[in-house]
Image (spheres, rainbow, N blue to C red):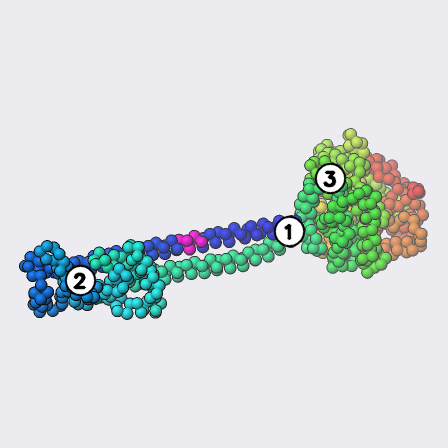
Amino acid sequence: MQKMENWNMKQKNMLIPVLLCLAFTVSCFSFLIYMMEKNEQEKITYFYNAAKQNQSTIKSRLEEELEILSGLSVSFGLGGIHSKDGINSIIDKINEGNPSMEIGFIDNDSQKAGDSVQGCYKVAVRDDTNHAIGMIYVKNSGEILSNIVSTMALAGEGLLVILDKQGKEVASSNQAFYTVTEATKLRTQIQQIIKANEQGSFNIRTQDKKRQTVVVMPLGVNGWYLLNVFPQPNFYVRYLEMTIGVGVMILLSCSLFLSFFYRQFLIINKNQKTLVKLAYGDSVTGTRNYSSFKHEMEKKLRKEKSETYAVWYCDIKKFKFMNDILGYEEGDKVLISLANLFRDYGGPDTLYCRISADNFAGLYKYKTREEMEEWFQKLVTLFQDRYLPYNKKIPMELSMGAYCIEETDVEELSIDQIVDKANIAQKNVKGLPGNPFGFYNKEIRNRVLFESELESEIDRALRNQEFKIFVQPKISIQEENRIVGGEALVRWENPRKGTIPPGQFIPIMERAGKIVLLDRYMFEKSCQWLRDYLAAGRPPVNIAVNVSKIGMLREDFVDFYGEIKNKYEIPDGLLELEFTETVLLNDDAMFNRLVKRLNEKGFVCSLDDFGSGYSSLNLLKNLKIDVLKLDIMFFRKSSDISRERIVISNIINMAKELKIKTIAEGVEYVETVEFLKSAGCDVIQGYVFSKAMPIKEFEQMLIEKEDECLMPVDTGE
């Protein structure tokens, strides 16, 4: 549907300039046609005017000749000369004196006998009783008429013809007139005009394809008609050629424009597809991205309000581990395989997307919650059958959370909020073994509300110093179990909720970006206590403070910690900064430069939670740290204690050879203490000696146990 809408929009966008171009072309050609018609009208008017001038001139010439004949006729009547012989003798004398005009006389008897004087100048001769006795006529009138019309032909190229009432030629400037034109068509049109006793015009073409205009109008003499044939004037021909040329240029220009526009449209369309793919597609899997998913999901929910939909949020457990072990190319194959699985088995009207990394979200039309759980387990089976990494001992596992959309959610919640609820449900079950699936419920909602309340109170808690320092002692098992330091831990003493453990508020502060404020708060408070403790004349003691990843990446990290240390005049070697393995970057050189700068300012640097990750030995090889803290996971009783102790002993020996001090944390059993002592571990931190306590109690413990040895006590279950 979206593609069809996009295509329709593209068609409309293309149609507008095409229509504008066509409108421009039609307008131009309409104007050209109008100008050509106007030019034709002006030309016809011009020819009619020329024809009228010819008519007037010829008529005047004819009337002059007729006046001569009329004068003779009158003189014959007044002189009483009525006989044929008498009239002819006078005419003969006149002809001798005027050879250009040969006059003749024909009496009534001769006309009755069949003699004709058609096509001639003629005037009736009358007797005393006004009775016509004959006709005076000009014998060479045709020759005279031909001379008149020949001299009046337009620039020697035009043609004048005098026609009688039957359309027969009386005189012409070109005797071959009917043979060089469209004779049949011409005669028909001429006869139609003469029959209507009107004037008219039409166009013809000569045998050499030249265009000419014919104008026919009454001459006003003898019932004759004057036919004018005008060749097209050169300026009209040039105007027509220019008009046609302009039209062709306009047509070519529009064609070039449309061709160029179409080419640009194809380029823009291609670029648009690329941009749409970048904006709404996922570059790794080729599926929708989150922006496209939100748009389509909102349309579907508003359109199908009566359907029961759930939003699911899924990710691959330990995907980063697989990426680093097998490589990113292999990781991308897993993502593509999972995306194809959602495409093929995503349920009715499949709609899903890849949000980021290994996180996918989708919309599922469900009947019951049990049916949706069965669908997920089927996906898990298909996924593990479809793709397994090269190491068959590490099968890929999925975790999914779902939120069932209620009818009011479409109006009250945004798509982001709905997806967040599914994400919260997924995070809630992700720590469970296997391939867990869970729905967003009231319990999760209450926890989210609780966390939201905590987040809103963080700033106030920092201002009011509600975060308190607890310290867990560090015991040197190689120095008769003496207290040699402690790790500063944080507890939140909330006035309304009581003591809040760090596991509840630390993740919230990390998400809210406020963990750096807590890091620096705890460090400065530790420095304040250590300064007061040393000022009282107490023996030096080491205090370790945790550093978050965000805090370590701050540009002013080293400078800030150095300034606080100097501010409280803490001697070198007493402040230890703990970096967890998870905060380290792949750039070992950068971390080593950071450690070097901290060492120069008198800090001890330790690597915390060693063994909790998967690249610990690589870190131990590359990082120049001062202290190595072994993670609690090494000290949980396993099925094969001997193998466990071999691993721990070798790690401690490697650390000693690298001149790195070792601390074991989370120790709960006396036998573990004895083993670690024999293995060469330097310090133990755990419940076997002491739990974390408020810093004032730790100070009192230091005073009371200054010259005593602490005895380990089993605390593990």
Outermost residue on the top side: it is 496
Distance from label 1 to label 2 (Cα)? 90 Å
Image location (x, y in percent) of residue 520:
72, 41
The residue tagged 2 is 121
Residue 127, numbered label: none
Q: Amino acid at mark 2?
A: Tyr
27 left or right of 373 in image: left
Q: Amino acid at mark 1?
A: Lys
Q: Tell me the SS state at disc 1.
A: helix
Which comes before the other along the chain, label 2 or label 3?
Answer: 2
Q: Tell me the SS state at disc 3.
A: loop
- The residue lying toward the viewer, choosing from 1 and 553, is 1
Label 2 packing within 10 angstroms: few (<14), some (14-19), many (20+):
many
Which comes before the other along the chain, label 3 or label 1?
Answer: 1
Q: Is residue 30 magenta?
A: yes
The residue tagged 3 is 306
Q: Which residue is rendered at x = 24% and y = 59% of the image?
A: 224
- Which quarter of the figure is the C terminus placed in? top right
Image location (x, y in percent) of residue 338:
76, 54
- Tell me which segment is drawn in magenta: 26-31
Q: Quadrant of residue 701?
A: top right
The residue tagged 1 is 3
